[in-house]
Image (spheres, rainbow, N blue to C red):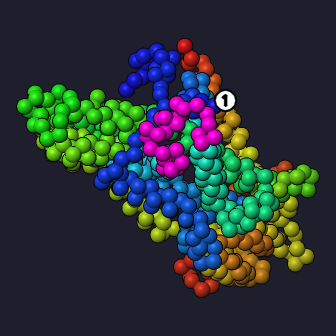
């Protein structure tokens, strides 16, 4: 392993990380707003008898990951289409 | 700014690993102090207790945010948003006055990078040793140093991830569960997620986060003007630069004060040369000031060849702190903070929601009365339990001579004890005589519906009052349904 190369992330790496980072920021805001108005506990109660949904933490996590992937999709597409 | 200047590929190819040199001085001490305080707050706060529970806890399952004695609910979301606006405006304000103070001293990216750099220095040695080590072929000693660094980095990153999750889950429980390997998969996931993010940002990406990923670095120039405090090189005094022996008067050689020792470049964590003027990569950490001052001391020249100053002062013009920009930011900030404090102080620590029973709109009782059932959600946001008395607000059209209210609660005055910081669901019944039985006939006929045979729906208002504090009340509106006569 050449340590000199490990810290140079390259243009693709830079683009990927920037996309993920912007998606993370936007997803954090979206998650906060969404769950401020929507309480996932009735959904948990509804699902509990049939499936293995252990706790609301999972709903919050899934909610965040959902927003994260949608935002990453949007900013990823933007970055890709703007590539000269 | 470099946007669009050179072709991107070659722009990237120019990137070299930055080996920041260790530096000592006033600003370094200030930076290290700030790092200790901020890291101490981050790693220490989740362990702080307050009235028997974690002092700062963003309890997601219970949907409550505990901040010492204050409990915020999702209904108080506006306070959180408000706080974020205040934080953003403070950033604008401080940037306008003193430049990138945030970047140099308070940004988590800077603070964690400092810690990771320190660990690198402990395991791999100072700047020249690190460069030699990286250039050297692999050996047992190199492997050992690199492995030790990675162990420190990964351990610290995992501890960071654990602490972060500890703001959302009671940290003592989390610690015991993690050590017993019985933490839920999601808790483990988030510890690893944030551990990985810390490692990636502070160990791996470092200055590249500031250069390529930070939005603030891009728009901060909008808050700058020629009176903003920035880190500058006094070119008029420094140039022409050149080497000379100690104690030589620069004027006698036709030189400026800059000895071209390049220490300011070597200490820079973003790898720029401050002598080329203000650059967007500069995070204003002031490491170059400390480096240059030590050289000036050594040479016997006055300090401050590189210093905090404003563009106007460098141009030998007067500089003003109070400018329209600063006044506007400052006034907005004062109004927002004042409003926040007042709103928080006036916030009622009790809330009431009323839901009409979904299954049955109304019931005809054998006594000839009509009954509606309601579910009251009583929120006690206070830090102590309260007993709440439920009542109906007196109605205007109360002329039947039998008490002031046409509607009455059954029982007459229900009371519910609600523990601190909890939502209590209470079912209450409201009754009134049927229309044809009522003395007044000019009742409000707002919701009459011929098809369902449903008659009017009267507005009624529920009021809850704390038994121990009459000022602690909340009010909510609902409707009373009755059949058409």
Figure quadrant of the C terminus of chain B:
bottom right
Kindly tell me whether residue B457 is visible in this rendering. no
B42 left or right of B360?
A: left
Residue B75 within the magenta-colored segment of the rendering = no
Kindly tell me whether residue B202 is visible in this rendering. yes
Q: Would you call the spot at circle 1 few (<14 residues within 10 Å), some (14-19), or many (20 or more)?
A: some
Q: Position of residue B234 (x, y in %)?
A: 20, 36
Q: What range of the chain is rendered magenta?
A: B118-143
Residue at 35 percent of width and 55 percent of height: B30
Residue at 75 percent of width and 70 percent of height: B425
B337 left or right of A11?
A: left
Rendering quarter of residue B414 = bottom right
Q: Is residue A23 above or below residue B404?
A: above
**Residue tagged 1:** A73
Q: Position of residue B210 (x, y in %)?
A: 46, 37
Q: Position of residue B336 (x, y in %)?
A: 40, 56
**Near-viewer residue (B103 or B127):** B127
Q: Is residue B462 above or below residue A60?
A: below
Figure quadrant of the N terminus of chain B:
top left
């Amino acid at each position: 392993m050449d340590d000199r190369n490990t810290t140079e992330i390259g243009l693709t790496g830079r683009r990927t990380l920037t996309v993920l980072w912007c998606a993370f920021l936007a997803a954090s805001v979206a998650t906060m707003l969404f769950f401020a108005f929507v309480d996932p506990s009735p959904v948990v109660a509804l699902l509990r008898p049939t499936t293995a949904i252990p706790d609301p933490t999972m709903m919050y996590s899934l909610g965040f990951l959902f927003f994260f992937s949608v935002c990453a999709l949007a900013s990823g597409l933007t970055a890709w289409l703007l590539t000269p | 700014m470099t946007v669009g200047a050179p072709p991107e590929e070659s722009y990237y190819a120019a990137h070299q690993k930055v080996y920041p040199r260790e530096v000592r001085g006033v600003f370094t001490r200030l930076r290290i102090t700030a790092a200790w305080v901020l890291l101490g707050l981050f790693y220490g706060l989740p362990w702080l207790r307050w009235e028997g529970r974690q002092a700062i806890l963003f309890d997601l399952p219970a949907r409550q945010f505990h901040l010492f004695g204050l409990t915020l609910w999702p209904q108080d979301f506006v306070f959180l948003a408000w706080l974020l606006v205040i934080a953003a405006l403070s950033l604008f304000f401080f940037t306008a006055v003193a430049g990138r103070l945030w970047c140099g001293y308070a940004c988590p990216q800077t603070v964690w990078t400092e810690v990771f750099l320190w660990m690198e220095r402990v395991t791999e040695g100072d700047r020249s040793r690190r460069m030699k080590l990286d250039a050297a072929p692999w050996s047992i000693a190199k492997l050992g140093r690199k492995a030790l660094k990675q162990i420190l980095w990964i351990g610290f990153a995992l501890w960071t991830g654990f602490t972060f999750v500890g703001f959302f889950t009671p940290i003592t429980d989390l610690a015991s569960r993690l050590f017993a390997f019985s933490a839920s998969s999601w808790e483990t996931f988030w510890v690893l997620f944030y551990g990985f993010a810390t490692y990636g940002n502070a160990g791996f990406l470092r200055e590249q986060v500031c250069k390529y990923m930070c939005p603030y670095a891009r728009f901060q120039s909008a808050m700058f003007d020629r009176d903003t405090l920035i880190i500058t090189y006094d070119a008029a005094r420094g140039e022409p630069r050149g080497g000379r022996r100690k104690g030589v008067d620069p004027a006698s050689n036709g030189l400026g004060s800059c000895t071209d020792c390049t220490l300011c470049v070597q200490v820079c964590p973003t790898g720029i040369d401050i002598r080329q003027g203000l650059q967007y990569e500069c995070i204003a950490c002031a490491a170059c000031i400390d480096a240059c001052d030590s050289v000036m001391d050594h040479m016997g020249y006055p300090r401050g060849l590189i210093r905090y100053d404003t563009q106007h002062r460098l141009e030998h013009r007067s500089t003003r702190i109070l400018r329209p920009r600063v006044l506007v930011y400052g006034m907005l900030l004062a109004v927002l903070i004042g409003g926040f404090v007042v709103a928080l102080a006036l916030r009622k620590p009790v809330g009431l929601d009323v839901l009409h029973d979904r299954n049955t709109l109304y019931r005809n009782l054998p006594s000839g009365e009509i009954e509606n059932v309601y579910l009251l959600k009583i929120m006690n946001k206070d830090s102590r339990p309260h007993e709440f008395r439920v009542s109906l607000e007196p109605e205007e059209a109360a002329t039947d001579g039998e008490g002031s209210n046409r509607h009455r609660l059954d029982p007459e005055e229900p009371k519910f004890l609600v523990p601190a910081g909890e939502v209590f669901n209470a079912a209450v019944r409201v009754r009134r005589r049927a229309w044809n039985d009522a003395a007044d006939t000019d009742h409000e006929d707002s919701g009459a519906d011929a098809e369902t045979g449903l008659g009017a729906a009267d507005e009624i208002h529920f009021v809850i009052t704390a038994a121990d504090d009459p000022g602690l009340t909340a009010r909510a509106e609902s409707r009373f349904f009755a059949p058409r006569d």
